[in-house]
Amino acid sequence: MDEEGPLFSGREPSLIDLIVAPFAVRLWLFDYSKDGLGISEEGRGGDDENSWSRWHEWLTATNKRKSIEETTSERRHYPQIYQRYADNTAQSELAKATREGKGVP
């Protein structure tokens, strides 16, 4: 990552920002439905907080982008949907195909 940021390659978004952003903005769901990913939360201290400071800077800048704000649902909508996937009880066609070891329908 670019040392000055705030995005991956500097001030302007690049392909990597656009590819990673849809997944990164939902990583908090692992803390909600599983045991988390081990990413230190900003401002909570911990041995590896400094290791993650650049990540937090990138994620904050990403979340503030108009394109992210306009295409991401409010957080309250995600837990009940994602919990079904975490529990392996989702009934979407994709979930059914995944359980059966098939490709995307």
Image (cartoon, rainbow, N blue to C red):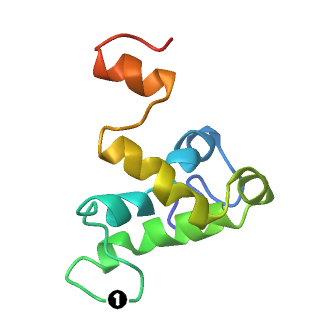
Quarter residue 74 falls in: bottom right
Number of residues whose C-alpha sits closer than 10 Å to that of mark 1, classed few (under 14), some (14–19) or many (20 or more): few
* Along the line of sight, the residue nearer the viewer: 68 or 53: 68
Q: Is residue 66 above or below residue 49?
A: above
- Circle 1 residue: 44
Question: Going by the image, does 12 lie left or right of 28?
Answer: right
- Residue shown at 48%/71% (left/top)? 56
On the image, the x and y values in percent for residue 34 come to: 27, 58
Residue 23 in sight from this viewpoint: yes
- Residue shown at 30%/89% (left/top)? 45
* Along the line of sight, the residue nearer the viewer: 33 or 2: 33
How many discs appear?
1
Residue found farthest to the left = 47
On the image, the x and y values in percent for residue 5 come to: 59, 65
* Along the line of sight, the residue nearer the viewer: 96 or 98: 96
Question: Going by the image, does 97 lie left or right of 48?
Answer: right
* Along the line of sight, the residue nearer the viewer: 96 or 49: 96
Q: Is residue 86 above or below residue 77?
A: above
On the image, the x and y values in percent for residue 51 come to: 31, 72
Question: Going by the image, does 32 lie left or right of 22?
Answer: left
- Residue shown at 47%/59% (left/top)? 79
On the image, the x and y values in percent for residue 40 come to: 31, 75
- Residue shown at 41%/89% (left/top)? 43
Q: Amino acid at mark 1?
A: Arg
Q: Is residue 99 above or below residue 70?
A: above
Quarter residue 70 falls in: bottom right
Q: Secondary structure at mark 1?
A: loop
Residue 26 in sight from this viewpoint: no
